[in-house]
Amino acid sequence: MPTDDDTGRASPPTADRRAAEGAGDPRGGVDPLVPPRPAGRPADWRRVLSVSVLAFFLWFVLDAPTLQHNAQVSPVGARRTVSLDLVGPIAAVSRGLGLGHVVSGLNRLLDREGNRPGNGAGLAPEKPVTPLTTPPTTLPLPTAASPLRPNPHVELRVLVVGDSLGIDLGNALVPDLLATGVVQATLDGQVGTGLTRPDYYDWPTELGTDLSRDTPQLVIVMIGANDGQDFLGPPDVPYGSAAWDATYAARVASFMDEATSTGAQVLWVGMPPMQNPVLSAKMDNIDAIVQAQAAKHRRVAFVSSATILGTAQGQFTPYLTTPDGEEVNVREPDGTHIAPGGAEILSQALLAAFPHDLHIDLPH
């Protein structure tokens, strides 16, 4: 028992005495002055599930453009179609809100290596494109000697068509054309589409509707990002075969014939280099086929975007430096789509090509 101190009150036990008394404590030496630590409670499974679902939803929204790209380049089949249908709307929302830049910023913060200048396969040197000449038609093309100069009284009607990269371009090009005050411009873009899968989206039929409704004098085309896949049969025509190249060339030529059938000119914009070297090589092949077909059409001009959105050697880069030293993000984090800064650079390059390639003078 503790002894009384000078005040007559019982003195508290010393540490040594507490240890000695605890030695015989049936509870295993727990100090009676210190309350026992409560046992940890297992996490509520409902809370864990809610947090997990929220985290998955945030990841899905932020990474939707990349998931969409992965679906676009996947093998043809029901799985690809369902994936595009599910991911497409979410990817459109993600791009519209600019959420891809959040992912890009995190990648730069974490110093991830994927999205760096110089990655991807370089494009082969371009073949010279046959200059545009005036064909025998009731709607003659403008020539270098007699260029077309639209004015507010007679506007130039322009139609921009394409896949998701065509939409990226059109979102910058259409406002730039409208800003001239002498152009009436329309954009018809469809995500996940191309010329190899008319069963998924029939571009020739859509183009016919556009031509009838908008009666364009100039059609700007940017299609091809989803076309590096087999043609459905029977029999299937595998990508990479000579038969595939011939079939694709025929479809491109037919699309050019249709686009020019009402007297319009066509400006076909090639695909930019991609971060994925396999996809970049496919785009190189597709560009070569399109450029060869453009050279056979008097009303079609081809403009490569390889060195406009890539390095001087035509390789992938997510950033470009302007002449005044400003660094511009030109590609989205998925390494495929075009960022707003890149779309504006490409738009200005096309406008600069109007007088040279199309003999169309627009006010500056």
Image (tube, rainbow, N blue to C red):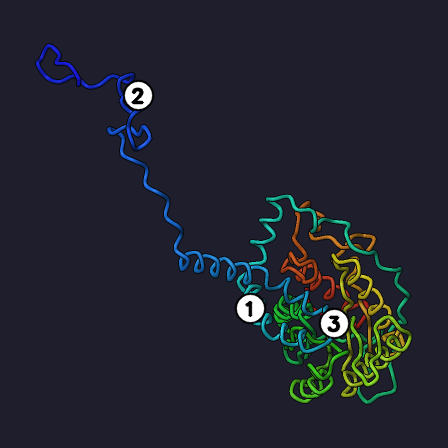
Q: Tag 2: residue type?
A: Ala
Q: Which quarter shows the N terminus?
A: top left
Q: Dot 1 lies on which element?
A: helix
Residue 200 locus on image (x, y percent): 69, 81
Residue drawn at point x = 59 percent, y = 58 percent:
100
Q: How busy is the neighbourhood of tag 1: few (under 14 within 10 Å), some, or many (20 plus)? A: some
- Locate residue 361: give its quadrant: bottom right
Residue 2 drawn above or below residue 236: above
**The one of 97 and 279 positioned closer to us in this rendering:** 279
Q: Which quarter shows the C terminus?
A: bottom right
Q: Tag 1: residue type?
A: Ile
Q: Going by the image, does 338 lie left or right of 119?
A: left
Residue 170 locus on image (x, y percent): 65, 70
Q: Which residue is labeled 1 in the image?
A: 90
Q: Is residue 185 visible?
A: no
**The one of 134 and 256 positioned closer to us in this rendering:** 256
Q: How busy is the neighbourhood of tag 2: few (under 14 within 10 Å), some, or many (20 plus)? A: some
**The one of 228 and 195 positioned closer to us in this rendering:** 228
Q: Which residue is labeled 2 in the image?
A: 19
